[in-house]
Amino acid sequence: MSAKTVGRNAPCPCGSGLPYKRCCREKDRAEQSARDRARSITERERQEAARQAQLEAFDEARALDNASNAVLDLLEAGKLGEAEQAARELLERYPEVPDGHERLASVYEARGDHRQAAECYRKVIEFIRANPDHFDPEYEQYLVEKLAAN
């Protein structure tokens, strides 16, 4: 029984014949307080879990950016073999984004393998078209132009 629904001077609902305030009121208040604390803890835990998930997503996004940019750095350094390996690792680690295919296309372009570069650009364009809400139309146009150049 809740302390909010029984008047303090009313007979206790437990049937003891005592006024509620002298019988079960404190027990009911303690139970309600325990329920309130449990709800509060649960909400704090939910908020902490959400915050932790956001931090993990941010860390993962940063790792993706670093891995993607590392391929470009290797290309600039003329290390095509290492750049290709890094692009393939990018594809394997992050299959849910098009970066790996785009970086691999850049490696193929640097090697003069335009057929393979074009195939990679097609995969990126296909990915973008399957997920249009996540990409700017200008990005797709840029890739279509890269594809046409290969």
Image: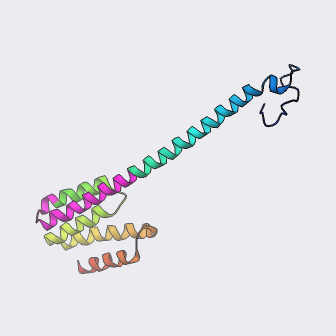
Q: Is residue 114 left or right of residue 47?
A: left
Q: Main secondary structure of the magenta part?
A: helix
Asked if residue 72 lies in the magenta stretch, the reply is yes
Give the camera-side residue of 54 and 18.
18
Q: Position of residue 149 (x, y in %)?
A: 24, 80
Residue extending furthest toward the left: 78
Choose top left, top right, bottom left or bottom right for residue 20. Answer: top right
Give the camera-side residue of 147 and 46.
46
Q: Is residue 39 left or right of residue 26?
A: left
Question: How is colour applied across the structure in the image?
Answer: rainbow
| Quarter in which the C terminus is drawn | bottom left
Give the camera-side residue of 115 and 131.
131
| Quarter in which the N terminus is drawn | top right
How many numbered discs, if any?
0
Residue at 35% across, 79% down: 141
For the magenta stretch, what is the residue range? 56-82
Asked if residue 112 lies in the magenta stretch, the reply is no
In the displayed structure, 144 sits above or below 85; it is: below
Residue at 15% across, 62% down: 74
Q: Position of residue 134 (x, y in %)?
A: 43, 67
Give the camera-side residue of 119 and 87.
87
Q: Position of residue 65 (x, y in %)?
A: 29, 60
Q: Position of residue 104 (x, y in %)?
A: 23, 64
Residue at 31% across, 57% down: 62
In the displayed structure, 67 sits above or below 109; it is: above
In the displayed structure, 42 sits above or below 21; it is: below
In the displayed structure, 76 sits above or below 46; it is: below
Q: Is residue 46 left or right of residue 55?
A: right
